[in-house]
Amino acid sequence: MLSGHGDNRMMLIGQAPGGVEAVARLPFQGRSRRVLFDWLMQAGFASEAHARRKVYMTSITKCFPGKGTGGGDRRPSQAEVDLCRPHLDRQLALIQPELLMLVGGLAHQRFLPGRRLDALVGRTFDLSGREVGSRTSIRPLLLPLPHPSGASRWLNDVENRALLDRALRRLRPLVRQLLDQPIADAYTSRQHAGGAGAGRRRT
């Protein structure tokens, strides 16, 4: 499941569609929706619709994994993550985003494995996993965020909320730069010919 446009220069990668998303066929429709888009508006987007138009949204796994024994959504297995990996690889190759917002543990594990959440949020990284400053010219930049689900207790800690604030402050100038940058400066003719295409796409 995804939503986005071929001219998007930012990509947001979540964990897996939930039950609400599976019905709506659109990412981030459940209880995490309000929290996530509040974060994105703090980072510089004018509205939820603006963020959805400018950010390509996808996930580590592509199908609703079903409910777990505790009643919440089941965490996808490693086999499911591996099965969906080529689909995400293809999305990355087609869109070639300059900024990757990584939301939740599965996205963190894919790109920045083996690190605690408090060692990720509030920092920016390159694709090799090396921490870099947000003013670097290296692209793509990786910016981890906690999962916005109300089931997460991580943000109950005041120190963790400060890390989230730091992450959103780092995100704001990156978003502004990419929103202001003409499409012609961000994509080469070869990338346009590669099939990313224009217009909204969902699966």
Image (tube, helix red, strand yellow):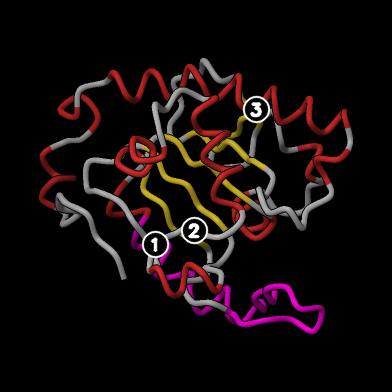
Is 82 one of the magenta-colored residues? Answer: yes
In the rendered image, which residue does mark 1 sit on? 26
Vertical position of residue 86 compared to residue 28: above or below? below
Q: Nearer the viewer, mark 3 or mark 2?
A: 2
Residues drawn in magenta: 65-91
**Depth order, front residue of 140/122:** 122
Q: The residue tagged with tag 1: helix, strand or loop?
A: loop
Q: Nearer the viewer, mark 1 or mark 3?
A: 1
| 91 horizontally vs 164: left or right | left
Q: Are marks 1 and 3 in contact (CB under 8 Å)?
A: no
Q: Are marks 2 and 1 in contact (CB under 8 Å)?
A: yes
Is 198 one of the magenta-colored residues? Answer: no
Q: Are marks 3 and 2 in contact (CB under 8 Å)?
A: no
In percent of width and height, residue 151 lies at 77, 58
Upstream in sequence: badge 1 or badge 3: 1
In the rendered image, which residue does mark 3 sit on? 167
Q: Residues within 10 Å of mark 1 (few under 14, many from 20)?
A: some
Q: The residue tagged with tag 2: helix, strand or loop?
A: loop
In percent of width and height, residue 133 lies at 60, 19
Task: Give the amino acid type for the residue marked by disc 2 in the picture.
Answer: Gln
Which quarter of the rendered picture does the C terminus lie within? bottom left
Task: Give the amino acid type for the residue marked by disc 1 in the picture.
Answer: Leu
Q: Which mark is residue 29?
A: 2
| 63 horizontally vs 146: left or right | left
Which quarter of the rendered picture does the N terminus lie within? bottom left
Q: The residue tagged with tag 3: helix, strand or loop?
A: helix
Vertical position of residue 21 compared to residue 171: above or below? below
| 79 horizontally vs 127: left or right | right
Determine the image quadrant of residue 47: top left
Q: Residues within 10 Å of mark 3 (few under 14, many from 20)?
A: many
